[in-house]
Image (cartoon, helix red, strand yellow):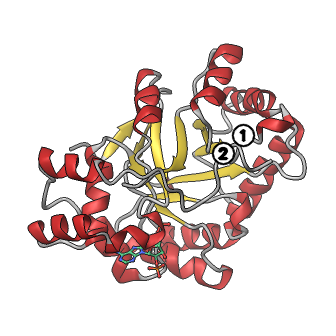
Amino acid sequence: MPRTLELNDGSAIPALGFGLYKVPLEETERVVAAGLDARYRLIDGAEFYGNEREVGTAVARAADRGIARDELTLTSKFWGDPDQSPAAARKSFEATERSLGTHVDVYMIHWPRPARGQFVDVWRELIALQQEGRVRSIGVSNFTQAHIQSLIDETGVAPAINQVESHPWLPQHDLRAFHDANGIVTQAWSPLGRARILDDPTIKKIANNHGVSPAQAIIRWHLQLEGALIPKSTHPQRLRENRDVDGFALSDDEMARIARLETGERTGTHPDERQ
Ligand code: A2P
């Protein structure tokens, strides 16, 4: 199974990273260090998380421990509230660079905010940043198929990544198929359904079959769907556990049993709800 996913711009990202949403400021440096020690090489951040300076400090310290900057993929996202203009996107991008103290590898639009009617113009600004050589890859987050289709129709450039909520209750099969058809990587946020799915009896049983934890079984499911994901934990032991998913594989039958858990239930906000 590939541990790296090719992007439509010719670069690649690790399939499995870790997320920093709601990681408290005073814990961020420690969590990033623990993640890097656990061999993660993709760190999913955002302006909105408010902890990019701390991420930058941890990344600088990692360099002292022999983890080169070019081994890492740092992602960030343009929040777009109160201002979702292209100029605001560029300003946010530059603020993120300053906070991190290093370049951004993947820059995304955090939410489409469709009622504002600006996400296509913001996308043009991200394309410009990429053409200027300031960012390797550009993507979006929380975009529906219709939103992405507008980007493609109006600019001819498909995002490299769409980061969306996805877990066994919300597998996003249709969106994944659309992404596949357009060379877009699906990157799941809340891949463990904010831990609520860990108690599901089917997941527990499948995990037991392999002598792994429910979190490991779900992470393996994401990887076998050929998706990227960014599970989050503030505990070093869980970060290691979530990274340790190479020693087993789910059978087709187990994948099918997990597919039947779909309820459509979200643990977060729907893309059209956030304006
Ligand atoms: P904690 O940070 O206390 O470890 P998601 O990534 O789907 O949003 O899920 C994140 C939630 O899942 C967090 O509350 C995190 O709690 C918890 N979590 C992450 N990994 C594990 C694990 N291996 N076992 C149990 N809970 C986990």
- Please count the marks in the image: 2
Which residue is located at x 54 percent, y 46 percent? 163
| Position of residue 158 measured from the top left corner of the image (x, y, whole percent) | 57, 24
Viewer-nearest residue: 116 or 229: 116
Which residue is located at x 57 percent, y 67 percent? 20
Residue assigned mark 2: 271
Q: Indicate whether 16 appears above or below 146.
A: below
Question: Element under label 1?
Answer: loop
Classify residue 189 as left or right of residue 48: left
| Position of residue 238 measured from the top left corner of the image (x, y, whole percent) | 36, 78
Looking at the rendered structure, the kind of residue marked 2 is Pro
Residue assigned mark 1: 112
Which residue is located at x 90 percent, y 52 percent? 82
Which residue is located at x 25 percent, y 46 percent? 224
Badges 2 and 1: C-beta atoms under 8 Å apart? yes
Ligand 1, seen in the image, is in the quarter at bottom left
| Position of residue 178 measured from the top left corner of the image (x, y, whole percent) | 46, 26
- Image quarter where the N terminus lies is top left
Looking at the rendered structure, the kind of residue marked 1 is Pro
| Position of residue 192 measured from the top left corner of the image (x, y, whole percent) | 41, 64
Classify residue 251 as left or right of residue 191: left
Q: Residue 28 sits in which quadrant?
A: bottom right
Viewer-nearest residue: 257 or 14: 257
